[in-house]
Image: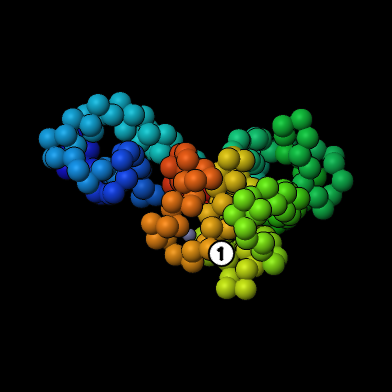
Amino acid sequence: MEISGIDIKIIKSKRKTSSIYIERDGSVSARVPETLSDNEIVDLLKAKEYQIFKHLAEWQELNENAVEREYVSGQSFLYLGRNYRLKYDEVESGKLYFKRNTFYLNPTDQPKAKDLFVKFYKQKLNQKLPKIVKSYQEQLGVYPNAIKVMELQNRWASCTPNANVNFHWKCAMAPIDVLHYIVVHELVHLIHPNHSKAFWNEVDKILPKYDEQIYWLKLNGAGMDL
Ligand SMILES: [Zn+2]
């Protein structure tokens, strides 16, 4: 369906609310209740035209920034959903420091800057994730065996049949509410190992606004490569 020159893929769903997404490749899709007629869908999308343009502009900006991040002074890096600048300074070598809303590295560490960022993100997640998992496990009645932070291919998190939950170190770039969503998503998989209606109902019970977190992940996924 075309609205104001933008091609929008319509996905009819059983949900009562509608949402519009910009996919990773910049294409636009709208999830709408299956009960809507074509005319109603057109009206709905036209009413959201401004939002669509705004989201597209944001996507374009993010994706321009997504090309090859250089580890130079002034470059910004995501941490818990916000961008902070990197500065080279006479801090102790071998470690990335985060203080006063700035990342610091010793100039001699520039060649291994990427590794130091990954190490930093892993360390922070290892501190934060157990607490977040704990805050939901009783409510859900699931108790993971182990929580690990690692490099995962194209996935934010995964879980194994023996209840180990793995998180990509990139999760540290996401805002805290998105991190909570990723945790809840994986914990619910320990009950429903699929994306069935029952699975989403369970997620919805705990995080009724999970659409917003999914949207953040879609919008920012491309800007998260180190
Ligand atoms: Zn899943």
Residue situated in front as seen by the camera: 93 or 214: 214
> Which residue is painted at 47% across and 46% down in the image?
204
- x 49%, y 46%: residue: 205
Looking at the image, which residue sits at the far right?
92
Relative height, residue 20 to residue 148 (above, below): above
Coloration of the structure image: rainbow
Q: Quadrant of residue 199?
A: bottom left
Crowd around label 1: few <14 · some 14–19 · many ≥20 (10 Å): many
Q: Is residue 37 above or below residue 145?
A: above
Image spot of residue 213 (x, y percent): 49, 42
Q: Quadrant of residue 39?
A: top left
For this orientation, the residue located farthest to the bottom is: 162
- Residue 68 visible in image: no
Label 1 lies in ligand 1 vicinity (Cβ under 8 Å): no
Identify the residue at image location x=43%, y=42%.
Answer: 211
> Is 154 on the left or on the right of 139, as rendered?
left
Q: Would residue 10 appear left or right of 150 to someone viewing this image?
A: left
Please report the residue visible at 58 percent of the width from the left and 71 percent of the height from the top: 160
- Looking at the rendered image, the quarter that the N terminus falls into is top left
Decide: is 189 above or below 32. Answer: below
Task: From the top left corner, tell me how far across and down residue 58 is, in percent.
Answer: 42, 34
Q: Secondary structure at mark 1?
A: loop
Q: Position of residue 193 (x, y in %)?
A: 49, 66
Figure label count? 1
Front-most of residues 74 and 164: 164
Q: Which residue is mark 1?
A: 190
Amino acid type at circle 1 is: Leu
Residue 50 visible in the displayed image? yes
